[in-house]
Amino acid sequence: MKFHYKKYGPGVFRPVIPVGISSLGKILSYEVLIDSGADMCIFDAQIGEILGIDIKKGQKSFVGGITGKNEIYYIHEVKIVVGGWPFEIPVGFLPQMADLSYGVVGQKGFFDNFIVKFDLLKQEIELKPRT
């Protein structure tokens, strides 16, 4: 399946795709940045709360990004649906992520479920589910 990069401004395109997220019988549409440098999938804590997840009851962990500042996040298992393909994955819900309009999918939970091809010149992402 192929997705096109999303435009965020003049000359700014990112590999952001739509996914479905479900937990506890609730389903939500969300956009995620495909980030090969991310160790795992991280979503805004508000997304988890909307799905009915008690965020702080998850496994506590820390993430440090480009700024080097560590932030707490809480890991929960959720189902994501990408191009019609459902996967149960661990997701870290990060309370301090509200500045981004999308989540991040990374190595654990996404790249271990898909073969990912980026084509910057075509502004296209191709995903093939691992079977």
Image (cartoon, rainbow, N blue to C red):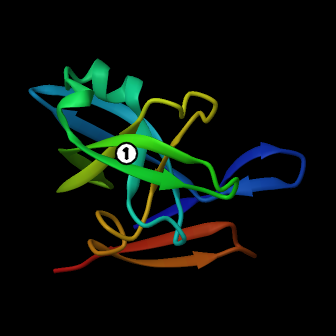
Residue at 17%, 31% in the rendered image: 57
SS under mark 1: strand
Farthest residue, direction left: 25
Q: Please tell me whether residue 92 is drawn above or below residue 122 in the rendered image.
A: above
Q: Is residue 78 visible?
A: yes
Between 15 and 64, the one nearer to me in the picture:
64
Circle 1 residue: 19
- Within 10 Å of disc 1 (Cα), the crowding (few <14, some 14-19, many 20+) is some
Q: Quadrant of the N terminus?
A: bottom left
Residue 86 visible? The answer is no
Q: Measuring 27% from the left and 39% from the top, which residue is drawn there?
A: 21
- Residue 50: x and y, percent? 30, 19
Label total for image: 1
**Where is residue 94 drawn, in percent x and y?**
43, 37
Residue type at mark 1?
Val
Residue 43 lies, in percent from the top left, at 41, 41
At 29% from the left and 63% from the top, the residue drawn is 109
Query: Which quadrant of the figure has residue 97?
Result: top right
Q: Is residue 95 left or right of residue 98?
A: left
- Extreme residue in the right direction: 10
Judging depth in this view, the residue of 48 and 34 nearest the camera is 48
* Residue under the image location 49 percent in, 64 percent down: 38
Residue 33 image position (x, y, % from top left): 54, 53
Is the C terminus in the top left, top right, bottom left or bottom right quadrant? bottom left
